[in-house]
Amino acid sequence: MIPRTTLSKTLRHFSTSARASVHISHIGKNPISIPPNVTITQSPTSLEVKGPLGSTSVPLESYMKLTFPQENVLTIGVEDAEVKRQRSMWGLTRTLINNAVVGMTEGFNVPIYLVGVGYRAALEDDPRGTTNGGNGQRLNMKLGHSHNVYVPIPAHIKAEVPSPTKIILFCTDKHLLGLFAASIRKWRPPEPYKGKGVFIGDEQIRIKSVKKK
């Protein structure tokens, strides 16, 4: 008689169930729709995207494979999806190309909200002009400090102040837009006790209760 422990080990060892190990990028596999007013030019090391709002380029690794299965539809693949580096760059490259297409056709915008008593923002001319790479304007903000906060607006950013507590930023590059929005937020990050601060988009924080002694 075969002991129960030995029998169970034997059955597990000779299990007939098979597992298919297929690696694929769930982001990279999605096709990208190319609008008719966008032109794409591929080189061995980059992909140039031209649209109504300008042009930009996305770096390409040597193992990236770009194909057009249909007109105005771009698909992205890699040589060997089993390689972790290629698989991670697969999804990243797809995201960068899609952001480039959207940026050159529609652009990106993000609202910034100033939450707090006396918090205000105004758009004004920068006395320094465009000498430091700005577009000639700056944000003049009151954020609870003993002084006003002045933030020059870069040349690639467009800003609007529709109300004293709301700022709208526009840019064709999503990454640069996020960096500039973060540079404004750092002057007064949201605090969790009174909920005051500079909020980007639909950012929310969980309010904490004050511990009483």
Image (cartoon, rainbow, N blue to C red):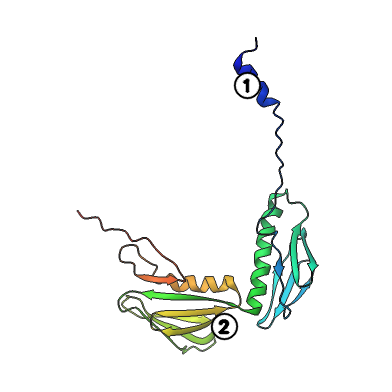
> Quick one: 195 or 156, which is closer to the camera?
195
Residue at point 58%, 70% (across, down): 175
Q: Is residue 149 above or below residue 45?
A: below
Q: In the figure, is residue 26 to the left or right of 123?
A: right
Q: In the figure, is residue 189 to the left or right of 107?
A: left
Label 2, residues with CA under 10 Å away: few <14, some 14-19, many ≥20: some
Residue at point 64%, 74% (across, down): 102
Label 1, residues with CA under 10 Å away: few <14, some 14-19, many ≥20: few
Task: Determine whether the residue tagged by mark 2 lies in a helix, strand or loop.
Answer: loop
User: Residue 110: x and y, percent?
Assistant: 51, 75
Task: Tell whether label 1 touches label 2 (CB within 8 Å).
Answer: no
Residue at point 66%, 72% (across, down): 100
Q: For mark 1, what is the residue?
A: 8
> Quick one: 59 or 147, which is closer to the camera?
59
Q: Is residue 27 above or below residue 104?
A: above
**Of callouts 2 and 1, which one flags the residue occurring earlier in the amino acid sequence?**
1
User: Residue 99: x and y, percent?
Assistant: 64, 70
The mark found on residue 82 in the picture is: none
Amino acid bearing label 2: Ala
Task: Determine whether the residue tagged by mark 1 lies in a helix, strand or loop.
Answer: helix
Amino acid bearing label 1: Ser
The mark found on residue 155 in the picture is: 2
Q: Which mark is nearer the camera, 2 or 1? A: 1
Q: Quadrant of the N terminus?
A: top right
Label 2 to label 1, Cα distance in Å?
Answer: 70 Å
